[in-house]
Image (tube, grey):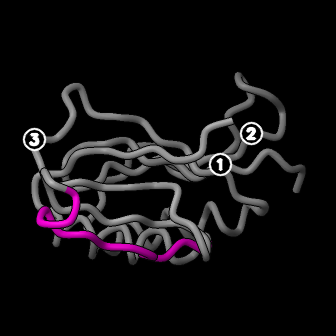
Amino acid sequence: MIDHTGISVSDIKKSQAFYSAALAPIGYSMLMEFPASVTGHTDVAGFGEAPKPDFWISQGAPNKPPIHVALRVDTRAKVDAFHQAALAAGGVDNGAPGIRAHYHPNYYGAFVLDPDGHNIEAVCHEAE
């Protein structure tokens, strides 16, 4: 089981604003933030559902190639809300909300590129 994961971003403040807005509809918020003086190497911020972050961003050279991260949600409405919020926060559409039947009949996902080109997805596996 994966406990947490993370990506590198070119502008942590810009990415904090993006992810705070984009992930709010799925119940994620920024729960922790540590400067380089604490981590010993770079500024980091952790997002998730309280009390523990499971998605981290860190200041640095963005991952090349960009990373794909899929966040599971329990309703299709949350997928739609994520997509709308991420676009409003400056994300780039990389796949509108919809069924991806080639994965399975109830795979409902939406994809957005973050400020560094990482492909961020919200996905629901439940029937409508």
Does the magenta-highlighted stretch encompass residue 60?
no
Residue 123: which numbered mark, if any? 1
Does the magenta-highlighted stretch encompass residue 37?
yes
Q: Earlier in the sequence, mark 1 or mark 3?
A: 3
Q: Which residues are magenta?
A: 27-39
Question: Residue at image x 34%, y 34%?
Answer: 67
Q: Amino acid at mark 2?
A: Tyr
- Residue 33 in the image: x percent, y percent? 31, 73
Distance from disc 1 to disc 2, alpha carbons, whole Å, reads 7 Å
- Residue linked to disc 2: 107
- Residue 112 in the image: x percent, y percent? 40, 51
Question: Residue at image x 57%, y 67%?
Answer: 52
Question: Residue at image x 62%, y 46%?
Answer: 109
Q: In the orientation shown, which residue stands out farthest toward the top?
A: 102
- Residue linked to disc 3: 61
Residue 65: which numbered mark, if any? none
Distance from disc 1 to disc 3, alpha carbons, whole Å, reads 27 Å
Q: Amino acid at mark 3?
A: Ala
Question: Residue at image x 51%, y 50%?
Answer: 96
Helix, strand or loop at label 2? It is loop
Labels 1 & 3 near each other (Cβ < 8 A): no
Helix, strand or loop at label 3? It is loop
